[in-house]
Every structure is written in C-alpha cells, then in structure tokens.
Amino acid sequence: MSVLLFRVDERLIHGQVVVGWARRLRPRRIIVVNDELADDALEQSIYRTGIPEGIRADFWTEREAREQLPAAIASEEPMFVLTADLGSMARLTRDGVRIGEINVGGIHRSEGRRRVLPYVSLDAADERLIDELEREGVRVVARDVPTAAPVRLAERTRG
Amino acid sequence: MTGRCGVVVGHGRVAEGLLSALERVAGEQPNLWAVSNQGRGGDELEAEITSLLDERCEGREAYLLSDMDGGSCGQVCRRLLAKGLVQAVFFGVNLPLLVEFAFLPEQPFEQFVTAAVEKSRKALGAHR
C-alpha cells in the first residue's frame, strides 16, 4: 500500500505529522488536498518550511486530487494524504480512492461541535459521515501520534 | 528500543516544557527525562541526575542535554561528563535537537553526536 496514512487534521502539515508519523512511517511524499491552500502560495511556503529533507509535498485542489491521486497511489511511492476535514476525505472515497482507515489527528472545538477527545470535536454532520464511512468498510480512527492509543470514533458518535 | 537515553537539564521549567513539547509531536518518550535546577544547588542537582542515570539508564548510552553551556545546569553536566557518567553533553538544547535525539538511528557515537548537532543547528535561524 503506497498510502501509509490518510489523515484528517485541521493543522495539515505540522509537528505531529512531520515528526511523530513521518519519522516512523518514512513517506517520500505528502499530498495535501485542500482547495484554499492549493491557491495560496504564501501559506504553501509556510507549510513547506516544516517538511523534512527527502519528502516532497503537493498541494492539490479536490478536483486535482480526483484526477491525479489514483495515478499517484499506483506509483507505489510511500506517501501521506492529508485533508483538513472529514468531508474532503470522504469525498475522495466517493471518487474511487480506496481507503481502509482514516486517521483523525485533529478536529478542534468550534460552534456546534461536541468534544469527544481532547483533540477531536465532532458536529452532527461529522458523526453521520463517520457512521456512513464505517458502514462502507472504512475505519475512522482517532490517534494524534503513533504512541497514542487508537480510538474508533464510531464508538463515540450518537448514531 | 533504542540503546540511548538522556536527561534534559535546564533552568526553570524549560526541560519539562521541551520534553512535553516533544511528546506532543512525537508521542511518549520512555528514554528521556527532564530535570530542573530550580531550588537546587549544584550538588543536589548532580545527585538527582546521577540517581536518574543509575536507576533508568544502566547499561545504555547516556547523554545529557543542557539548556545553556556555561550556566549552572551546563556546569553540573560537564562535571558528570568528567566523571564518565555520560557519553556526551549536548548544550543549547532545542526542540529540533530533541527530535534528532529521539529519532536518529543507532550509529557509532561520534557520528550520532555530529549528526544530531548539525541537524538541529540547521533548524535555528530567522525568516526576514
């Protein structure tokens, strides 16, 4: 499997990703799927600062991901795929990207979200998505760093 | 499990703060501990580090990481190095150095120390 980690994290590329996960799993590429960031050169350069040597990063719109991700995955290059929210990741699965497990690394508190873990807060739409994904055979697992205990989020939804 | 262990030694809460920051990004660190000089004289600090090393680091490559060379923490570290209790004392410890300490693969001592210092030194600078 060339995608070592499909991760949902509002902070996208940050310490836990480039240190905690990347130092263990050793990806050579990080693909960020985020429409806003794909169009923001300054933000991209800020995120690139944190990327270790030997890892290249791409910032794709959801449309670019739809078109290019299947070929990137087929290349067998070890990679991480990051999105800022569950909806974007779920759309990738709808577009035919096979995902066995989604790692949830950080969805922080905001209006209408219920805190289920210190680093994960979910609104009703997130909870519905998690239940749908699980029914489709995609495990949705919260785990901020590799040494943390994994938490199956379906057990924390009200569904 | 790595054969390397270390004690971060610093003023105030810098050592526990750095270690807690490392654990936030990299997960639990079973081979690193933090010690502060707050409220302790040099002898007391030296004794605390020595007993930590004795209890938890026995038989492994031990290192100290001090916050500032020449400060009181750094001086205690140098004395422990002179006594042969540790392999090396890193000074000016920052988060990137702790990352390298935790993740660099096992390798000969000289090579490890050089790589850790070079990589973390590169991580210090300024954007203008």
Image: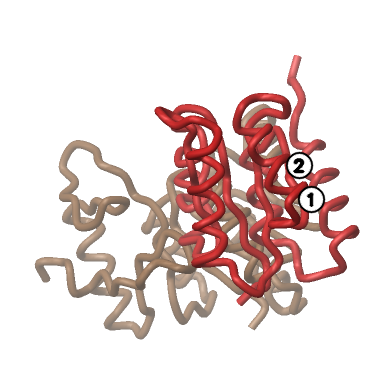
Chain colours: A brown, B red
Residue lying at 35% horizontally and 72% vertically, measured from the top left: A150
Q: Residues within 10 Å of mark 2 (few under 14, many from 20)?
A: some
Image quadrant assignment for residue B124: top right
The percent coordinates of residue A23 (x first, y second) are: 66, 63
B119 is higher (above) or lower (below) than B59:
above
Q: Secondary structure at mark 1?
A: helix
The percent coordinates of residue B65 (x first, y second) are: 65, 44
The percent coordinates of residue A154 (x first, y second) are: 22, 73
| The C terminus of chain A sits in image quarter | bottom left
Q: Which residue is mark 2?
A: B120
Residue kind at label 2, given as amino acid type: Ser
Q: Which residue is mark 1?
A: B116
Question: Mark 2 and 1 residues: CB-CB less than 8 Å, in contact?
Answer: yes
Q: Front-most of A119 and B35?
A: B35
Residue lying at 72% horizontally and 29% vertically, measured from the top left: B69
Image quadrant assignment for residue B121: top right
The percent coordinates of residue B2 (x first, y second) are: 65, 72
Q: Is residue A63 visible?
A: no
